[in-house]
Amino acid sequence: MPLRELLVKELRELTVSRSWWMLLILMGPLTGFSFLGSFRTFAEVSAGQGEALSPLIGVWAPTFSACELAAVFLLPFIAIRLVGGDRESGALKLELQQSFGTPFMVGAKAVVLLAGWTVAMLPPLSAFLLWHGYGGSLYAPELGALIFGHILNAGLTIALAAAMASLAEHHSTAAILTLSVTVGTWVVNLLGWGRYTPAAMVAEFQHGLVLLDASVIALALIFLGLGIAAIWLRLGVPQKRRVFESFALTLAVAAGIFAASFLRPSWDLSEGRRNSFSEADERALQQIHGLTIEAHLAPEDPRRADLENRALSKLRRAMPDLRVRYIAASSTGLFEQASSGYGEIWYIAGWRKEMSRATTAEAVLESIYAVAQVQPPAESDDVYRGHPLTAQPNGAALLFYGLWPAAFLACGILVQRKLK
């Protein structure tokens, strides 16, 4: 079967899938609910303070949360049907007799599913045009990071669903397994253990931060899921051999993930550099080497989260050789509050030490410059203030709640009648 015909066949399977058309229909209302709510909140902040949050944080991250929701609860069913349907119908046996093997078959299904997901992203992408029409500001690099993050997240969902559909005998079992793994990653993320979970990865992209390690690891997991699907769709191969090949592939990908976790390059594509210090501060920090920070804070202490989010996450990107040590006798710090040393943050550079209890980015920089005996850069007046917008989202409700669902419904009816 030529590759082109294989792609056409998978595309036909997708377009006759009612679950895909249901995804397209629901994306309009999901996007409308997120976009209208965030737009009105953004406008209220703009009118009340004369300045606003970054549109990326105030509008686009909430708007594209519809994509994250759809990728978790709707996209897996489409992928499971496309991957597992051939085996249940018996078409897989005929396809295996053709010249292409299961890697090409799974790859074709993945390409078609990503194309279908791109169509599903049209409603949130159309919000860009509405925002621009209302007079809002668009910054292409941060929007590109946002879109790339959600495409990677969809790829992870497709790979996971493909693997489960190839392992399970029935669609319902594959769906339960897929949702179980997804919920498990949520629990890991809530406990603060999952830096590379899909939710944590999407959160970074939604803030305009592209991390090379997270991107490579996501691609490796996508390769693993599709690889396992290709292995288990080979019906004529003994089960022991498929188990061995799956185990070997998992070990190889795990080694690659371990190596990728040491990658440090990253790119802050947000317009206001919200993930980084100012360029002047970063140049000054790059002159400092051998810095150690000892924070006497328990894992569940809110001050530790503030220190990480406000300062240390930015410092690690600006100072690759930075060493951070947390010292605590308990997980909550509840019984350590009376200790004289609890809450102290020590900055150590050679024989010099500096102590502070503040967790703000400004206080951390001040302590670092003091202990390293580096002259702080002059403060810049060029401070990002956001892009205020007090317009009303006229016509957005009609587009997302009416036109998009009606258009997809009409297209679905016409296409399915033509193909049947």
Image (tube, rainbow, N blue to C red):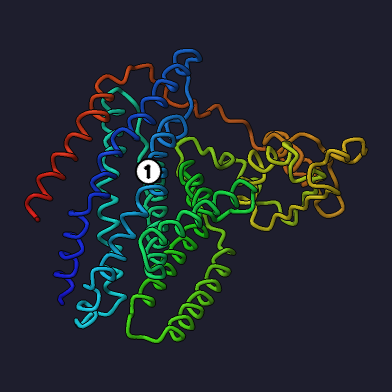
Residue at which label 1 appears: 67
The residue at 30%/38% (across/down) is 26
x, y percent for residue 168: 40, 67
Q: Quadrant of residue 414?
A: top left
Give coordinates of residue 273: x percent, y percent: 51, 39
Residue, far left: 418
Above or below, comparing residue 216 to residue 305 in the picture: below
Instruction: Give the left or right position of residue 122, taking residue 242 as reference.
Output: left
Give the left or right position of residue 5, taking residue 22 as reference: left
Residue at far top of view: 48
Q: Residue at x 50, y 55 (%)?
A: 180
Q: Is residue 30 above or below residue 22?
A: above
Q: Residue at x 16, y 37 (%)?
A: 407
> Front-most of 201 and 244?
244
Q: Residue at x 57, y 59 (%)?
A: 264
Which element type, helix, strand or loop, lies under badge 1?
Answer: helix
Viewer-side residue, 31 vs 339? 31
**Mark 1, other Cα within 10 Å: few <14 / some 14–19 / many ≥20:** many
Residue 309 x/y as whole percent: 63, 41
**Quadrant position of the C terminus in the picture:** bottom left
Quadrant of the snapshot with the N terminus: bottom left
Where residue 289 sits, quadrant-wise, is bottom right
Q: Quadrant of residue 307?
A: top right
Q: Residue 95, how many percent across, how many down?
A: 21, 77
Amino acid type of the residue tagged 1 in the rendering: Cys
- The foreground one among 375 and 270 is 270
